[in-house]
Image: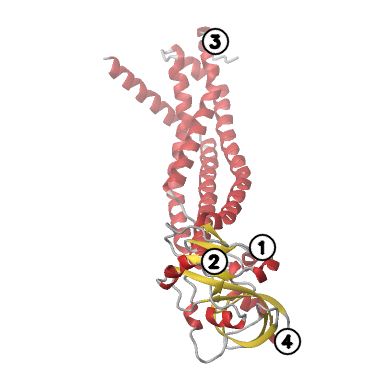
Amino acid sequence: MSDRRKERNSLVILRLALRNIKEGGLRTYLNVAALVLVILLIIGFQGLFDGMLASTTRAIIEDEVAGGQFWHENYDPYDPLSIEDSHGRIPEKLRNSIKEGEAEPVLIRLGTIYPQGRMQTALIRGIDPKQKVLSLPTETLLTENTDLPVMIGTRMARNMKLKEGESLIIRWRDSKGTFDAAEGRIVSIMNTQVPAIDEGNLWVPLDRLQEMTALPGEATIIIMGSDTDGHTPSSGWIFRSRDQLMSDIREIVRTKRISSLIIYLILLFSGMLAIFDTQVLSLFRRRREIGTLIALGMTRQQVIALFTLEGMLYGIIALAVSILLGLPLLFYLTSEGIALPEIIDSYGIAMGERLYPVYSFELVAGTVILIMSVVTVVSFIPTRTIARLNPTQAIQGKIT
C-alpha cells in the first residue's frame, strides 16, 4: 500500500511539473532555447577540435611521420644550420628493414632554387621513388625524360608560381663544400595537407641526391613503418617515436581547447543563470501555491522535488529539441565538412580544404551528463527556502 501511495504521489508531482512547464509560456521557450544553444555549441566546437586533431594526425602520420623516425644526432628541423652536418651512414641493423620496405631513408640537404630568375632557399629531400612507407606519390619521380626529376607540393607551386613540366635551376653544396648546380624539371605537383614537407621542399630520387652531394649510402632521417618494435637506438642516431613527433600538434589543439573553455563557461553560466532566475521567480510568484500544496498535505520534500523536477524537465526538453535540430546538422557537417579559407595554409597546421568534425559517443554523453547535472543542481538550490517554511507561513504563502 505504501509503494502504491509513493507511486501515486510521484505521478501527481510529475503531472504538476508538466503542467507548470506548459503554462510557463515564453519563459519556458527562452529557458529551453538557452539550454539548446549551450548543448549544440559545446558539442559543435568540441567536435571541430576533435575533427581537426583526427584529420591533422592522420595526414602527418601518412605523409611524414609513419611509425616513427631515426634522426641523425646532429639533425634539428628547427635549425637550418644543422642540416649540412646532419647525415651519416645507414646503420647495419636497419638495412634489412629498408630492403623489406619496412623503413625508408631520406637525405635532406640545403639548396637554392632560381624559379623564373628569382632566388629562393629550399630543402632538397632525397627519397626512394619506389617507397611504400609514406603515402606520397613518389612513383612520379620514376621518369627517364629528365636527369633530375623534381616533385613539389601545391603550396610551393602556388607561392613560387611553378607548374608541372617547368624547369628550374637548383644549386647545392656537396660534402666537400663545393657548390654545384643543375637544371631540374618538375614532374609532378603533389597535394598534401602537411606544410612541413610542402613549402620550401624539393623531392628528388635518393640515389640522385646522394650522387650530387657525394654522400653515397648516407641519410639524414630513417622513417620506420607502422611496426617499430624491436628497433634499438644506433650509434649516432636518435629514435623519435610517433608520439614524440606528434607532440607539437597535440599541444596546439590542447591550447586551443583551453582557450575555448572560456566560451564554454560563459555559455554554461548563461544557461545556468536562466534556470536559476526562473526557479527564484517561480518561488516568489507561486508562494501561495506552495502554501496551498503544503496545506493540502504535500510535504516540504515533495514540494522541493516538484520544483527540482521542473528544472530537470527544462533540460530534458532541451535535450529532445537538441536531438531533433542537432542530429541533421551534425550529420550534414560530418558528411560534407566545413570549407576552410586559404589563409589556414599559412598557420602551419596540416589541414585540408575541408574540416570534417568528429562527434564521439563520449563527447555527446559527457556533454549531456554535464548539462543535466548543472541544471539539476541549479534547480535545487533555490528550493532550499521551502525547507525553512513553518506551517503558518505556508498557509499564508509567505517566503522569507
* Tag 3 residue: 393
Q: CA distance from mark 1 to mark 3?
A: 74 Å
What is the x, y in percent for residue 318?
47, 41
Residue 117 numbered mark, or none: 4
Q: What residue type is disc 2 on?
A: Gly
* Tag 1 residue: 78
Number of numbered callouts drawn: 4
Q: Quadrant of residue 261?
A: top right
What is the x, y in percent for residue 5?
31, 17
Compared across the picture, whether 183 is left or right of 282 comes to right
* Tag 2 residue: 352
Q: CA distance from mark 2 to mark 4?
A: 31 Å
Q: Identify the mark nearer the N-term, 3 or 4.
A: 4
- Mark 3 burial class by Cα count in 10 Å: few <14, some 14-19, many 20+: some
Q: Image point 52% across, 7% down: which residue?
A: 392
Q: What residue type is disc 1 on?
A: Tyr
Q: Identify the mark nearer the N-term, 2 or 4.
A: 4
Q: What residue type is disc 4 on?
A: Gly
Q: Quadrant of residue 393?
A: top right
Q: Residue furthest bottom?
A: 145
